[in-house]
Amino acid sequence: MNNFIFHSPTKFVFGKDTEKEVGQLLKSYKAKKVLIHYGTGSIKRSGLFDRVVDSIEEANIEYVELGGVVPNPRDTLVYEGIDLCKKENVDFVLAVGGGSAIDSAKAIAAGAKYDGDFWDFYDHKAEMKDALKIGVILTIPAAGSEGSASAVITKTDGMLKRGFYSQFYRPQFSIINPELTYTLPTYQTSAGIVDMMGHIFERYLTKSDNTLFVDRLAEGTLVSIIEAGKKLMEEPTNYDARSVICWAGTIAHNGFFGVGRVEDWASHRLEHELSALYDVTHGAGLAVMYPAYMKYTIDEDIERYKRFAIKVFGVQEEGKSDKDIALEGIEKLEEFYKEIAMPTRFEGIHAKKEDINKLVEKLKENVGKTFGHFKELTMEDAKKIYELACS
Ligand code: NZQ
Ligand code: ZN
């Protein structure tokens, strides 16, 4: 196990009706004027927005609102939010929604405390030294942004989708009420499941030594997500299954599974190019990339993939070679994706083989010559993985 610092200071408030506590929570952080930032309307349709406003008003806190965050959030709305925060002297940004609203809120919080262009951070031209405080009411378990230190934004000019990591991006608090996720379309529930599993894979696939303790925690969490995910396909309002998915999705990406090891992130890099080019849902793009990435890197560490097959999918060992067991694990993963109605090939997300060169060019612009740590990949490797994802 490598040396590590694990600092996840977010206060998680979990359970039924917890969104009603938002006013008091904001008060405890001395918020005076809050920006309520949200997506394209689901929180208004469900009545959540009204409950949030009631709680904020009861706590005598002022607020302004900015909706309209689209999935794969854009820089254009971030600029609007920054101007609004500066004009209105906002001191706290509250995201109500999923990864897109939260990431947009994080970028606004950083930009409001910076005199230059917030994209400087994403261009690695400036160091983040401050940000407004951020709070979250989560409505979709997926991206893990409610506990993570990162935010992914797409620059509309050139459609560059980039992530930025900073401790200033850790929310002060995140309210997680599993009941708020009952209204999710199945596609979004499933894409969220793929995403949170992916956040575990990015840490599980490591070359670091002596990682068994956290590997076992990761395997147990994956088993629980799969079990709860299957349950939700039949019973979308099963509170216990929603709870598992909500909490697993949060710890999958708050750094818990990354301690003591070098993380990978190659599949996420590959996927971000898909969501940038086709505006595809991130989790659906990942369901296409993981089987291809795993098949491509299987020989890097057959033992690890074999362990994954046995511990997560219960693959039987008898009479099989190590590689066959490992491959069966990847097949089982693919079967699970299909079971929760996720695409597993390019055509399922309307991606085109003819675009592979374009995807690789953009990838190079974003990551440089190589990427990934489980296997250091070149642009030639990226091309082959995208090709595998077509067939
Ligand atoms: O626009 P609204 O009304 O919010 O509708 C959303 C959106 O259409 C809808 N939705 C959310 N909660 C709902 C609901 N519909 C009905 N009932 C509810 N309770 O679902 C759709 C997807 O929402 P979005 O916020 O885009 O989903 P997600 O949480 O998957 O976020 C995806 C974004 O997060 C980034 C992705 O790249 C993508 O841009 N990621 C962020 C990370 C981070 N900050 O740490 C890490 C991830 O790997 C990921 O890259
Ligand atoms: Zn992700």
Image: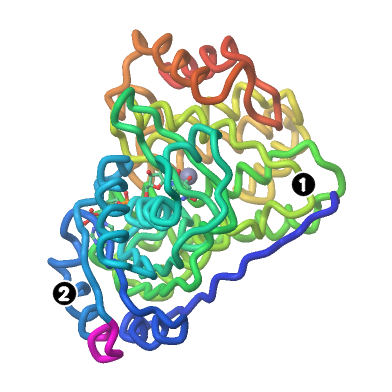
Q: x and y percent of residue 186 in the render?
A: 27, 53
Q: Is residue 318 above or below residue 188?
A: above
Q: What residue is rendered at 66% in x and 54% in y? A: 219
Q: Residues within 10 Å of mark 1 (few under 14, many from 20)?
A: many
Q: What residue would you read off at disc 1?
A: 261
Q: CA distance from mark 2 to mark 1?
A: 43 Å
Residue 173, image x, y percentages: 48, 73
Q: Give the structural element (helix, strand or loop) at label 1.
A: loop
What's the magenta region? 55-61
Q: Of the two numbered discs 2 and 1 on the same chain, state the one appearing first in sequence.
A: 2
Q: Name the residue at the left extreme.
A: 45
Q: Amino acid at mark 2?
A: Gly
Label 2 belongs to which residue? 47
User: Crowdedness of circle 2 by 10 Å Cα count: few (<14), some, many (20+)?
Assistant: few
User: What number is the disc on residue 252?
Assistant: none
Magenta segment: does it hold 352?
A: no
The kind of residue tagged 1 is Arg
Picture coordinates of residue 176 (x, y %)?
A: 41, 73
For the residue labelled by badge 2, is the local secondary structure a helix, a strand or a loop?
A: loop
Q: Residue at x 39, y 12 (%)?
A: 358
Compared to residue 252, the image places residue 360 above or below, namely above
Would you identify the image quadrant in which residue 41 lies?
bottom left
Q: Residue at image x 51%, y 13%? A: 383
Q: Quadrant of residue 273?
A: top left
Which image quadrant for residue 23?
bottom left
